[in-house]
Amino acid sequence: MPQKAKLVSIILINWNNFEMTRNCILSIKKNTNYPNYEIYLVDNGSVDGSIEKLEKEFHFLKIIRNPRNKGFPYALNQGYMEAKGYYLCHVNNDAVLLDGWLEEAIKVLESGPGIAIAGFREVTAEEASDSIKLQKARSEPDMEKMTLPVGWVTKKEMIKKIGYLDAEFFSPIYGEEADWNFRARNKGYRIVRASKANVIHYSSVDTKKAIGQKRYVVLINYHRLRAMLFNLSIIDLLGFIPGLGLILLNSIWQGTLLQILKSYWLNLKDWKLILGQRKQKRAYIPFKEPKFTIIE
């Protein structure tokens, strides 16, 4: 008798976004060939009726309800804690999954020693609709990465080794996945993007709408830089200087220079906190309540 495939727990987070979350779930149902999976939906205090509509349409969902928005990393940690799967899979609810996405990511995760996280490859809607362009994307080699922002597959045992996402210093959103990936790398694990696990990602449409463009720019740059400062060696940090300089230069003509400078200044003000976290080497993060950082 063939051995049953190991259970995958797919974790989605919803916050006042019925259509986008629905489209994500429909794409999972349509394009997942892996035979044994479950879907956890963590609702972060939605008030638009979206969770009620999703529950009514998709009876198979395992729903976790928060009375208020506790932020992205905390909600994902809830899914990690409750999930029963051998594999844990996080997917952004603003993603549409393409054919074979899950099994291809699992293949990469199991393809070599020390791979802790296998992430998805982002393609555009235009590439996804063009079979030639999509085939070209799928023919690219798997690639080791520093971070994997859109979603990934890991094993539940990795939570015991790496810890949960940091809801204390990366709430309400952004930077938490980079911090988690960096911590995995610092413990000797590999982070690999699976070239055949393709998804279309619509890039935080609901978050930008909710917090505003200016706050979005501050928050995403503030937390991503904080993740680097918490975890990277001096040599690795030096390697990011050209990229940070390019972001600063581009911000001049994009009209976001003040927001970028503010994100750098907020980290500079936190220098004692950053040095303390670097000394601790952030070896393991427990599951705990978030402390929100308010960005005005």
Image (cartoon, helix red, strand yellow):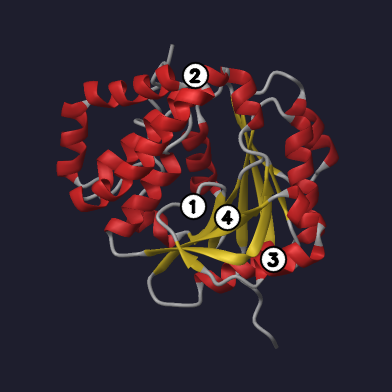
- Could you say which quadrant of the image residue 136 lies in? bottom right
Label 3 sits on what residue type? Asn
Residue 289 seen in this snapshot: no
Residues under labels 3 and 2: Cα distance?
40 Å
Of labels 1 and 4, the one closer to you:
1
Relative placement, left or right, of 164 versus 65 is left
* Mark 1, other Cα within 10 Å: few <14 / some 14–19 / many ≥20: many
In-front residue for pair 223/31:
223
Of labels 3 and 4, the one closer to you:
4
Relative placement, left or right, of 92 versus 237 is right
Checking the image for residue 215, the label placed there is 2
Label 4 SS: strand
* Mark 4, other Cα within 10 Å: few <14 / some 14–19 / many ≥20: many
Residue 5 seen in this snapshot: yes
> In the image, what residue occupies the spot 78% across and 60% down?
31
Checking the image for residue 148, the label placed there is 1
Asked if residue 3 is positioned above or below residue 39 in the image, the reply reads: below
Residue ID for mark 3: 36
Q: Position of residue 234 (x, y in %)?
A: 19, 48
Residues under labels 1 and 4: Cα distance?
12 Å
Checking the image for residue 89, the label placed there is 4
In-front residue for pair 178/237:
237
* Mark 2, other Cα within 10 Å: few <14 / some 14–19 / many ≥20: some
Residues under labels 4 and 2: Cα distance?
29 Å
N-terminal of the pair, mark 3 or mark 4, is: 3
N-terminal of the pair, mark 4 or mark 2, is: 4
Asked if residue 75 is positioned above or below residue 256 in the image, the reply reads: below
N-terminal of the pair, mark 1 or mark 3, is: 3
